[in-house]
Image: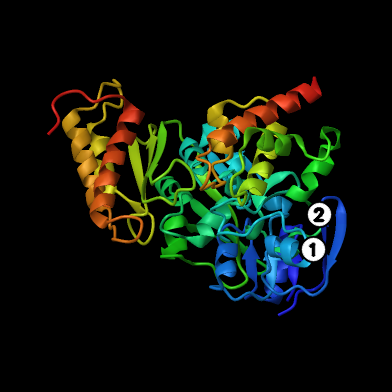
Amino acid sequence: MTVTIAHTLDDACAALAADPEALVLAGGTDLMVEVNRGDRSIGNVVAIDRVRELRGWTREGDVLRIGAGMTYAEMADPEFAALVPALAQAARTIGSPQIRATGTIGGNVATASPAGDMLPVLVALDAVVELRSSDGGRHLPLDEFVVGVKANALDPGELITAVRVPVLDGPQEFLKVGPRNAMVISVASVALVVDPSERTVRVGLGSVGPVPLRATEAEVLIAARIDWEGGGPLAAVDVDRFGDLVADAARPIDDHRGTAAYRRHAIGVMARRALVRAFGAAEGEAA
Amino acid sequence: MRTDPYVLTVNGHLHEVVDGWAGESLLFVLRERLGLPGSKNACEEGECGSCSVRLDGELVCSCLVLAAAAADRAVTTVEGLSATHADAGPLADVQRAFVDAGAVQCGFCTPGLLMAVDALLAGDPDPDELTVREAISGNLCRCTGYGRILDAVDRAAAIRREAVA
């Protein structure tokens, strides 16, 4: 068994071309759990945590290119957090300092867990995943990359190099529920991003379906009710209706972390809360 | 399946690992191959923090680090703490503070907590309580209720600030 410690993207792609079945190891916070449990047989490994091209982020106009190797801890950088606040908020809720020091956005996307906290934010942002192999590169929208519970569209020999998201100038919120303030695997999570130039509100849902979901009906309803020009307050009935439509969009299941009924209730509450945080307190009687 | 040989740098010493098996964590190699049992093994899934070490200065769970992938990086374990604070005597400042505060009961979480607190104070010499609670949020203690651990962090911070002053 060979562990290739790649220092460049070409090194990593060459090692994967030589053994397309090799495991790609980034922060290890998901993969090593499976290895330790004996759930994952391990052959050759390509460690990519020292690949310089995968680290950090760059802004190209209105697009933020986030290197797959960017850790959750690095997302606390205020300059980064100002460009994509919901992602930074989500990163701060993940695991512990130990996990945030090594876990990466690329790993979260590749693992494609229904509870991956990057995913509801990325689906709300219509993120695009950049993939690379020794044969070349391709781009996939996040919702085509995550194809099922812990299932992704990576081909053998391919790895994630970056995630692209738009830089928007509206408010963004991320909320999740779980039993503690730390070390929580989301029972349910909501990301809400506002694009004032397009006059859209986009809502991503986590842990309430096999893949991250969008709440399209809720998005359309609330976009039509927001006073985009005057900035007037939302009506309480609309906020309530928004929460109900978000809850309707969820496809939760019962499992050891929570029931479907609780998840559906919680996601509606969090969606209303996110909306009020973004647009201010609502006025009028609730429905 | 065996791994190719690799070299780990632990507490400033080089160790060649020649007979490793596939998938061995850094925690396993430290404890079972290098004779450094200070890092504890409890959950093996990054949940408890009892295996915390520094890897190139970053606090990490050694159970989630593939040992062979840590080659040529600087690993500091709890055994290396007192060596890095030689002025404090046989115990490092954080260790002295945990003893003085009575922050140790069964002791299983203690090495991980010492590493977490040492890492915290390296970056923030005077952390407020919320910062401390967040910094040790990945280290579970099922004995103390954390009161004396929080006290120990304050004492360690005070010792360290005094040493710098």
Give amino acid for label 2.
Answer: Val
Distance between the alpha carbons at the discs numbered 2 and 1: 9 Å
Residue denoted by label 2:
B10
Q: Which tag, 2 or 1, sits closer to the chain's start?
A: 2
Residue A148, image x, y percentages: 40, 66
Q: Which mark is residue B34?
A: 1
Q: Is residue B124 visible?
A: no
When asked about the image quadrant of residue A230, the answer is top left
In the image, residue A41 above or below residue B137: below
Q: Residues within 10 Å of mark 1 (few under 14, many from 20)?
A: some
Which image quarter is the N terminus of chain A in?
A: bottom right
Q: Residue at x 57, y 31 (%)?
A: B131
Residue A208 place in picture, x, y as percent: 32, 55
Mark 2–mark 1 CB contact (< 8 Å): yes
- Left or right, A210 with reference to B114: left
Chain identity of mark 2:
B
Left or right, B80 with reference to A242 = right
